[in-house]
Image (cartoon, rainbow, N blue to C red):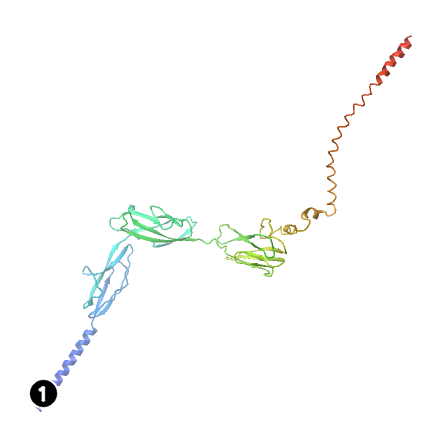
Amino acid sequence: MSDINKKRKFWLCRALLLITLVFFAQSCSLKKHIVKFDTDGGSKIEDVKVKDNKKVEKPTNPTKEGFVFDGWYYNDEKFDFNTKITKDITLKAHWEDIIGVRNKTMKILLNTKNQYKVEIISLPNGVKMSDLQFSSSNEEIVTVDEKGNLTPVALGEVEILVQTSDGKYSTKVTITITQKEIPVESFFIEGWTTIAVGETATLYINPTPSNATTTNTTWTSSDTSIVVINGSGTMTGLREGTVTITAETENGKTATYTVTVYVNGKVNNAVPVPSTPTTPSEPTPSEQEPNPTPETPTPSEGETPTPEPDPTPDPIPDPEPEPDPEPTPDPEPEPDPTPEPETDTEPEQEEGNNA
């Protein structure tokens, strides 16, 4: 019996040892350490728990206005994230000074009285505002002066470079130039009132105010079998007839325009007229010019009287009065002196009487 008891004790002790080892191993595997991240005034990074003898995952880099993140440090040395964690630790963010600006991206309205500027909020140690230089990546869109004042020139996007004179420190600001929407209040259409079959002409809108920005226009024809018109306002005559063209701006303003298509004609050479044309009839005779009587405007006023003006040139013979100078023979009246003998006879009679 003693041998049996000895064996029992042996196996019991062995079992207890195994149980102890298992608990110890489990306790070691369940042990975790806390890793804290001190951002030193930067964006917050949450603490993490890491199993014993495991690596901590590198977090997203924090940000701090006016500074550039330079890494995580432990005991004044840059931390290696391949290090296995065996205790609680605190990692501290290390920063380098940069030129800090209020807004890294800016939107500026074109043609505005507002003043815009690249606003500096922090500088590296030993750097003064007078040490900074400003430059634009495209001065045809935005110009910048030595104090960072911005002047928009055209629509687009540029980068403003801010740097120290020695080039050691720099930063960039993205500037986008946009345009304030100015709605069309009203408009009229300009262009040709007549076109020939197979020919094209383009219509345009004249908006009020003249600097309106909502000028994208949709064009429609009342009869596409007579005239078709595309999105640019270019119309094509398909067959003889008259249509109404309607234009609508993107903000809902509309206007109409009457166009007439003629057969074997040409695009009206008259000056384009407004949306409500009052002279569409004038082009009609011009289209009829190919007829044998091109000067139809004069006969239209009186067809039969037209030949009568032809004799009117008879006054042209007025040069006949030129022979009028022939009456120069008027000296013929010179025979008038014949009465003189009559006066001579009278005195003779007087002498007879005296006798």
Residue 308 sits above or below residue 336 on the image: below
Residue 261 sits above or below residue 131 on the image: below
The quadrant in which the N terminus is found is: bottom left
Residue at (20, 65) in percent of width and height:
89
Amino acid type at circle 1 is Lys
Residue that extends furthest to the bottom in the rendered view of this protein: 1
Q: SS of the residue at dot 1?
A: helix
The quadrant in which the C terminus is found is: top right
Residue holding disc 1: 6
Front residue of 253/265: it is 265
Residue at (84, 16) in percent of width and height:
340
Image spot of residue 68 (x, y percent) = 27, 56
Crowd around label 1: few <14 · some 14–19 · many ≥20 (10 Å):
few
Is residue 162 in sight in this rendering?
yes
Front residue of 51/323: it is 323
Residue that extends furthest to the top in the rendered view of this protein: 355
Image spot of residue 328 (x, y percent) = 76, 26
Numbered disc total: 1
Image spot of residue 216 (x, y percent) = 50, 56
